[in-house]
C-alpha cells in the first residue's frame, strides 16, 4: 500500500477547514442579525459580520492547531 503524495492534504484537514468556515458563517450571521436588530447602518452590518467571520474561522483553526 502506497501513501499519498505529500502535496495532498489529509482528509481530516479538509473537513476541519469546512467546519471552520461553517462556524464562521454562523457567527457572521449572528453578528448581522444582532446589528440589524440594533438598527445599524448597512456598512456597519457588513463590517461586524465580516470581522466575526474572520475571527471565528481563525479561532477554530487555532484550536485545532493547539490540539495537534
Image: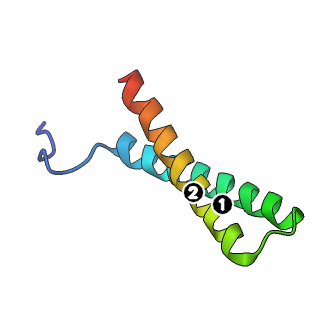
Tell me the tag on residue 51: 2
Q: Quadrant of residue 3?
A: top left
Front in this rendered view, residue 41 or 15: 41
Image quarter (top left, top right, bottom left or bottom right) of the N terminus: top left
Mark 1–mark 2 contact, CB under 8 Å? yes
Tell me the tag on residue 39: none
- The kind of secondary structure element at disc 1 is helix
Image quarter (top left, top right, bottom left or bottom right) of the C terminus: top left
Residue bearing mark 1: 48
- The kind of secondary structure element at disc 2 is helix
> Local crowd at mark 1 within 10 Å, few (<14), some, or many (≥20)?
some
Q: In this view, does 35 lie above or below 56?
A: below
Q: Is residue 11 above or below residue 21?
A: above
Question: Residue 28's x, y, as percent?
Answer: 66, 58
Question: Residue 23's x, y, as percent?
Answer: 60, 49
Residue at the extreme top: 67
Front in this rendered view, residue 64 or 55: 55
Amino acid at each position: 500500500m502506497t501513501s499519498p503524495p505529500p502535496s495532498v492534504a489529509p482528509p481530516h484537514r479538509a473537513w476541519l477547514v469546512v467546519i471552520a468556515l461553517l462556524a464562521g458563517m454562523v457567527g457572521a450571521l449572528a453578528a448581522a442579525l444582532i446589528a440589524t436588530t440594533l438598527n445599524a447602518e448597512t456598512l456597519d452590518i457588513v463590517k461586524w459580520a465580516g470581522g466575526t467571520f474572520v475571527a471565528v474561522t481563525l479561532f477554530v483553526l487555532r484550536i485545532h492547531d493547539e490540539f495537534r
